[in-house]
Image (tube, rainbow, N blue to C red):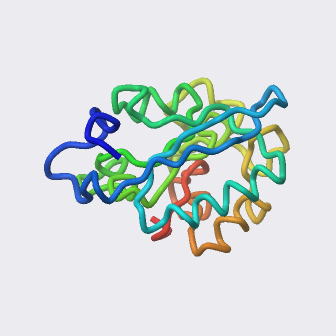
C-alpha cells in the first residue's frame, strides 16, 4: 500500500500505519449475474482470512453490489454506504462514539450496506434507499440473515456479525473483535 492509495481514509494519528494495510483485489459476483473485480483495504494480519471468506462467497455466487476502497468516496463512510459499496478500512470513529471504529484498524468490513443497513435501536436507518431491507429474515439478493452461510463463513475465521448486537443492529458489519 502507498499513502496515495489511502489519501482520504488514512491520516496521521490513525491507529494503524499505512505499511500495515494491504489492498486485496479479487473477483466477485455482481447483482447482474456477472463476475466483477473488487478491491478491499484491510490490515495485513487479517488479509488471508478475509480472502478465504470471499472465496467462499464467490463459490456461493453471493452477489456484491460494489467493492472499492472508501477513498473512491473521498473517505466518506456515508457516501460509500449510500452507494451500496462493500468496503473495509477507513480511519474513523465508531458510529455514535469518539472511540476508533474497528474499520480504523482495518479489521472490519461492511458487506452490501444497502441490502444490510445499520438499524438504530428505534428501528430507523440513516439511508432511505435501504428502507426495504430493514426487517430480517429477508430473502432478497445480497441480504445477510441470522445464521446464514455468510454469517457462518465469517464465524469460521472468528469474526462477529453486527446483526447480533443488542439495541442498534449493523447488518452489514463484520469484524475480528465482534464490535
Q: How many labels sit on residues?
A: 0
Residue 47 locus on image (x, y percent): 51, 61
Residue under the point 73% across and 61% down? 146
Q: Is residue 146 left or right of residue 47?
A: right
Asked if 74 appears above or below 165 in the picture, the reply is: above
Residue under the point 27% across and 51% down? 18
| Residue at the limit of the structure toward the front, as seen here | 2
Residue 36 locus on image (x, y percent): 70, 32
Residue 134 locus on image (x, y percent): 67, 40
Near-viewer residue (179 or 154): 154
Q: Quadrant of residue 179?
A: bottom left
Near-viewer residue (13 or 37): 37
Q: Is residue 114 left or right of residue 105?
A: right
Q: Is residue 6 left or right of residue 84?
A: left
Q: Quadrant of residue 149?
A: bottom right
Q: Is residue 144 left or right of residue 117?
A: right
Residue under the point 52% across and 34% down? 68
Residue under the point 40% across and 48% down? 89
Residue 22 locus on image (x, y percent): 42, 53
Amino acid at each position: 500500500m502507498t499513502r496515495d492509495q489511502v489519501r482520504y481514509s488514512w491520516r496521521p494519528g490513525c491507529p494503524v500505519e499505512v505499511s500495515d494495510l494491504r489492498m486485496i483485489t479479487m473477483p466477485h459476483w455482481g447483482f447482474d449475474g456477472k463476475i466483477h473485480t473488487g478491491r478491499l483495504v484491510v490490515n495485513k494480519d487479517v488479509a488471508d482470512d478475509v480472502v478465504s471468506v470471499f472465496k467462499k462467497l464467490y463459490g456461493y455466487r453471493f452477489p456484491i453490489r460494489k467493492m472499492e476502497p472508501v477513498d473512491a468516496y473521498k473517505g466518506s463512510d456515508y457516501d460509500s454506504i449510500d452507494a451500496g459499496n462493500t468496503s473495509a478500512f477507513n480511519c474513523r470513529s465508531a458510529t455514535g462514539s469518539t472511540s476508533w471504529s474497528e474499520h480504523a484498524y482495518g479489521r472490519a468490513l461492511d458487506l452490501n450496506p444497502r441490502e444490510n443497513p445499520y438499524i438504530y435501536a428505534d428501528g430507523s436507518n440513516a439511508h432511505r434507499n435501504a428502507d426495504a431491507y430493514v426487517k430480517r429474515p429477508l430473502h432478497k439478493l445480497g441480504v445477510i440473515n441470522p445464521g446464514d452461510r455468510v454469517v457462518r463463513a465469517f464465524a469460521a475465521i472468528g469474526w462477529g456479525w453486527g446483526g447480533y448486537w443488542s439495541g442498534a443492529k449493523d447488518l452489514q458489519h463484520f469484524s475480528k473483535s465482534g464490535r
